[in-house]
Image (cartoon, rainbow, N blue to C red):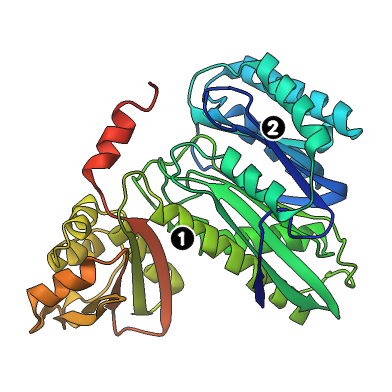
Amino acid sequence: MKQVRGGVTAAKGFFAASTAAEIKYKDRKDMALLYSEVPCKAAGTFTSNIVKAAPVLWDRDIVAGGFAQAVVVNAGIANACTGREGMEFCRQTAEHAGAALHISADRVLVASTGVIGMPLPMERILKGIDAMVPALGEDADSGHEAALAIMTTDTHEKEVAVEVRIGGQTVTVGGMCKGSGMIHPNMCTMLSFVTTDVSISGELLQEALREDVKDTYNMISVDGDTSTNDTCLLLANGKAENVEITEKNEDYETFKRALNFVNETLAKEMAGDGEGATALFEVKVEGAETKEQARRLSRAVVTSNLTKAAIYGHDANWGRILCAMGYSGAEFDPEKVDLYFESSAGKLKIVENGQAADYSEEEAAKILSEPIVTATADLKMGKEQAVAWGCDLTFDYIKINADYRS
């Protein structure tokens, strides 16, 4: 596997564009367009929130049909809790983009992120599409600008791409995402768009995405809020011209590894860029009996506000971690747990067999002062493990969300 420059335009046959449509922001781009020169197999996963935004409902129907060729994304307004009018906004967007791209409206996916409950300014949306279609480019810069355009409270763009060899051909998987707040497991609050030129059956494409989400996007949390707009879309246009993957063979496993690298990288980028965050907080649970036990325990720790606050304060308050594990609903023996803190400043055992180890608080504080901090819990029960990602909880999180609609 080789990481390459770019994101959604790294794979063959994919184009992107962006524009400043002034949907909500007046000082930056806020719309993006993603387009494949040929129809794509389409897969997707969506929010588990009962309150689903109109774009989620629209995309879910498109993905069920198996094919798509374009995605229109806007930032600033979520088009959520907008009823029938919201669905009409999706239809108008898809029809306008479809006409401009000379494709059917039922091949156009839409995605929105931003303030809930506000109507989309459709005149600006349609003008934005008109501006982007002639500007579509397949270069890395076009993809990069699109990644910038979909941000809301994100502090930086998030994109990645990798190449692998499948069936003697070079296959590329690339992606971009946005996410900073209202992020929680079970399809976290985010928009993610992954493109690939692999040739693969639609059924295996959907299965690969569905399974990978369990260990990537569903393992991050910033604030415990699951959004109305969570969407992950995966488009495969077959331009790599490998022999189509129709069974779970070595080629399928290679594709899954590339997909996992892209999704995990983007997921960690979102967790580390949590609103107001100063550190990416990674929680590993090892020595578990089952994968689900490890997932449940790691998610409980990474979502604990008390633990997140301790990470912000560089305080090795390990009792909060064991406490969170204890209310996770997963069974384990707390008197067997070893716990470690680790960062670029070193690694330190702070708990042995459920009790405080002999460690230096000063050394622990130094380790916890780094921008990436890992807590590892060894249950000593089996061979399964899982990793969850989050961030510290800071004063700035309150400031950002207190005036989010301003």
Q: Secondary structure at mark 2?
A: helix
Name the kind of residue labelled 1 in the image. Answer: Lys
Instruction: State whether residue 216 is above or below residue 70.
Output: below
From this viewpoint, is residue 74 visible? no
Q: Quadrant of the N terminus?
A: bottom right
Q: Is residue 77 above or below residue 341?
A: above
Measured as percent of width and height from the top left, residue 58 is found at 69, 32
Residue 58: mark in rendering: 2
Q: Identify the amino acid type marked 2.
A: Trp
Q: Earlier in the sequence, mark 1 or mark 2?
A: 2
Q: Residue at x 56, y 59 (%)?
A: 213
Q: Residue at the spot x=52%, y=23% of the render?
A: 26
- 251 sits to left or right of 211: right
Say which of 252 and 310 sits in front: 310
Tell me the residue at 58%/61% (across/down): 263
Instruction: Report the mark closest to the observer, 1 or 2.
Output: 1
Image spot of residue 182 (x, y percent) = 41, 40
* Residue that mark 1 sits on: 268
Q: Classify residue 195 as left or right of residue 156.
A: right
Residue 7 as seen in the image, left or right of residue 402: right
Residue drawn at (44%, 59%) of the image: 219
Q: What number is the disc on residue 348?
A: none
Q: Tell me which corner region of the image, top left, top right, bottom left or bottom right, holds residue 362.
A: bottom left
